[in-house]
Image (spheres, grey):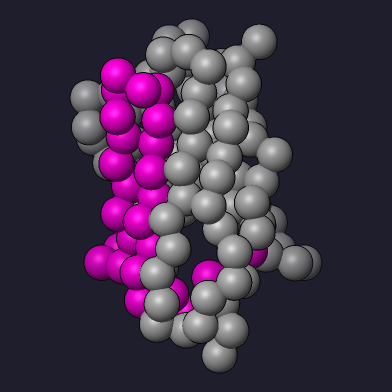
Amino acid sequence: QVQLMESGGGLVQAGGSLRLSCAASGNMFRMGWYRQAPGKQRELVATITIGGSTNYADSVKGRFTISRDNAKNTVYLQMNSLKPEDTAVYYCNAENWSLNRYWGQGTQVTVSS
């Protein structure tokens, strides 16, 4: 069973920055972040493949940067210019080579105005 260990998150003022990290217990094909705000569906934030191909939600392009350290099976999400609408629980997601998906427990990000 793949385990994902998330860290980072917290409370920040609008315009500030936060960095999320997620370490997987094994080598994963694709890793990324999703988020879920109260009363809303979970949505994609960004993903990155083991080869470095990235995909971003339009709402975070130019503000968030996803990266990974393949040697550590870890994905990072650098979040800059945060807005109150970025407030959500952020979930790490990982897909193995069979495209089975795994989820982290979630970490709260709160952006105050």
Quadrant where the C terminus lies? bottom right
| 67 to the left or right of 8 | left
Quadrant where the N terminus lies? top right
The answer to whether any part of residue 88 appears in the image is: yes
Task: Please provide percent x and percent y for residue 7.
Answer: 55, 45
Task: Please provide percent x and percent y for residue 50.
Answer: 29, 23
Q: In the rendered image of this protein, does residue 104 appear above or below residue 45?
A: above
| 95 to the left or right of 17 | right
Task: Please provide percent x and percent y for residue 69.
Answer: 29, 29
The answer to whether any part of residue 43 appears in the image is: no
Q: In the rendered image of this protein, does residue 40 appear above or below residue 34?
A: below
Residue 80 part of the magenta segment: yes
Q: Residue at x 40, y 30 (%)?
A: 74
| 107 to the left or right of 95 | right
Image quadrant assignment for residue 2: top right
Q: Residue at x 59, y 72 (%)?
A: 11
Q: In the rendered image of this protein, does residue 97 appear above or below residue 51?
A: above
Q: In the rendered image of this protein, does residue 107 appear above or below residue 29?
A: below
Q: Residue at x 64, y 51 (%)?
A: 107
The segment highlighted magenta reads 60-88
Q: Residue at x 36, y 76 (%)?
A: 81
